[in-house]
Amino acid sequence: TRMSRGAASRGGPGQQLTATCREQAAEIKALQEEVRDLRAQLEKAEAKARRRAAKAATGADVAALSRENKLLRDELRATANQRDALEGLFSRLSDEHARLRLQTAGGADAI
């Protein structure tokens, strides 16, 4: 306005107000830059946290898969042991069956 311009040119309260506004504008600009810097830091920290979480999840997945793999290997080993035991039993039963057939055949011949 005409009055404030006149007061500013004479060094009155209007000039002081203008200087205060400039100082506040500079402070606002500095704060805006600080906010931008802090946001950038926050984004970097969040990205880092996401990468760490993904890596931890991958590590947890690997650990879970490793545990599951161990359980499956144990189960496979137990199944192999059962198979070996059954094969041994079948072999003994086959031998016993053959012996009994010979005995029966021998007994029939004796009659």
Image: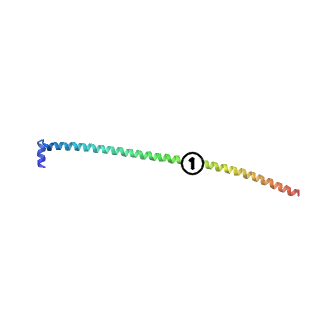
Counting the numbered discs, the total is 1
Horizontal side, residue 43 vs residue 22: left or right: right
The residue drawn where x is 52% and y is 47% is: 62
**How packed is label 1: few (under 14 Cα within 10 Å), some, or many (20 or more)?**
few
Q: In the rendered structure, which amino acid carries the disc numbered 1?
A: Asn
Q: Which residue is tagged 1?
A: 69
Q: Is residue 55 above or below residue 97?
A: above
Q: Residue 38 at what x, y percent from top left? A: 33, 44
Q: What is the residue that sits farthest to the right in this orientation?
A: 111
Horizontal side, residue 34 vs residue 54: left or right: left
Horizontal side, residue 19 vs residue 55: left or right: left
Q: Residue 25 at what x, y percent from top left? A: 22, 44
The residue drawn where x is 80% and y is 54% is: 100
Q: Residue 41 at what x, y percent from top left? A: 35, 43
Instruction: State the scheme by which the image is colored.
Output: rainbow
Q: Residue 40 at what x, y percent from top left? A: 34, 45
Q: Secondary structure at mark 1?
A: helix
Q: Which quadrant of the figure contains the C terminus? A: bottom right
Horizontal side, residue 102 vs residue 6: left or right: right
The residue drawn where x is 76% and y is 53% is: 94
Q: Is residue 110 above or below residue 15?
A: below
